Amino acid sequence: MEAPTASRPTLATLWTDGLGRASIRSVQALAVAALVVVVLWAITRVPLVLIPVTLALILASAISPLVHLLTRRRWPQALAVATSFLAILVVFGGVVTGIAYLIRAQAKELAVRFTNGIQQLHDFLNNGPVKVSDAQLNSARDSIQRFFTSGSIGSEALSGAKTVGELFAGVVLMVVILFFFLKDGPKIRGFFIGFMPAQHQSKAHRALERSAHVLGGYVRGTALVALTDAVIVVVALLILHVPLAVPLAVFVFIGGFIPIIGATVAGFLAVVVALVSTGPVSALIVLAVLIAVNQLEHHVLQPAFMGRVLSIHGLAIVLSLAAGTMLAGIVGALLAVPVTAVGWTIIKTWTGRDEVQAA
């Protein structure tokens, strides 16, 4: 009697073993990755729409608690929205006006100090530990002058004018979108959720609710951290009699919305102003203050203000900052962390991991 021969694998059985299942998952992963790349490419083609919408969504998440507070105190919905909307416009307008006024008021003093500081820096470079001759300084100055008098500056100016126009249009669009987000946020959210299958709508609603909570908490926590950084810096600049202390502190505050490096990088402008206005000693003191503020922010302020809201590892923050900067420059760096936080919140809610962690 002949021994039974082993059956040859068929085409169907090739996909049922471990390698076959891994191949199917690999193809699925590649398809999802291709879809993500296409979506990212598409949305980065319309930055004038995408960036205002994202900024308006972030601001609306941060301001919406004020609207809810006013409505709970029996304010009409329209009046609560209008009051919150006007409040944020007044705050931003007051900050911009104050900076412009301070710069104009201290421009003459800064010019005098700048001239003296340049002379001190020139003497230091001539006689310091690493001596730089006048010929080398003149060569560097001539190179800078040639750059600013070259023919390419005209095209750069036109490009700059175009950028200013796009920036103005983006700000106007963001203001309009912010108003409608504050006024009709639940309706807009319900409209988009309505396109989903009925069995997923409750989960999608919960994911958006928690994402709005995370986004608003992130903005408010980051604002508190940035404000603390700015207060410390402005106190140091005032003690050292560095001009434009308040505008420089405002730049530090704005930079604080880029985690890890934002406030420190923005603070280097204060170091430069201190160097040319009050000398290298003041500049070194300002630099030391910035480093101390950076450590305080990472080890004390961020865990205290955002520890429960932003449950993202530091490595994920660094990678998201790098990706956002590569995709959209400074704006991408500003939006990278909140977008990552919202994405992670949606994933946790959709997969049920948030309920496991809460339990």
Image (cartoon, rainbow, N blue to C red):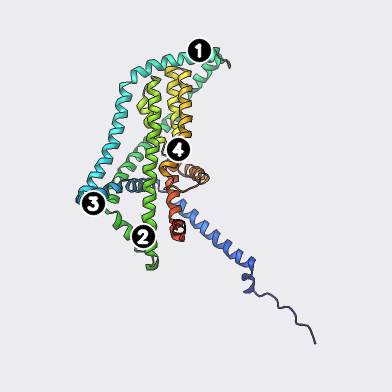
Please tell me how crowded label 3 is: few (under 14), some (14-19), or many (20+) other residues with Cα within 10 Å.
Answer: few
Secondary structure at badge 1 equals: helix
Report how far apart the C-alphas of labels 4 and 1 lie in the structure.
41 Å
Query: Which of marks 1 and 4 precedes in the sequence?
Result: 1
State the residue at coordinates (30%, 54%): 185
Q: Could you say where residue 157 lies in the image, as x and y percent from the top left? A: 40, 31
Q: Name the amino acid, label 4.
A: Val
Q: Nearer the viewer, mark 4 or mark 2?
A: 4
Q: Are marks 3 and 4 in contact (CB under 8 Å)?
A: no
Query: Which of marks 2 and 1 precedes in the sequence?
Result: 1
Please tell me how crowded label 2 is: few (under 14), some (14-19), or many (20+) other residues with Cα within 10 Å.
Answer: some
Left or right: 322 in relation to 6:
left
State the residue at coordinates (39%, 57%): 207
Q: Nearer the viewer, mark 2 or mark 3?
A: 3
Q: Name the amino acid, label 2.
A: His
Report how far apart the C-alphas of labels 4 and 2 lie in the structure.
34 Å
Q: Could you say where residue 302 lies in the image, as x and y percent from the top left? A: 44, 40
Query: What residue is disc 2 on?
Result: 205
From the viewer's side, name the closer residue of 346 and 163: 346
Query: What residue is disc 4 on?
Result: 300
Give residue 72's mark: 3
Q: Quadrant of the N terminus?
A: bottom right
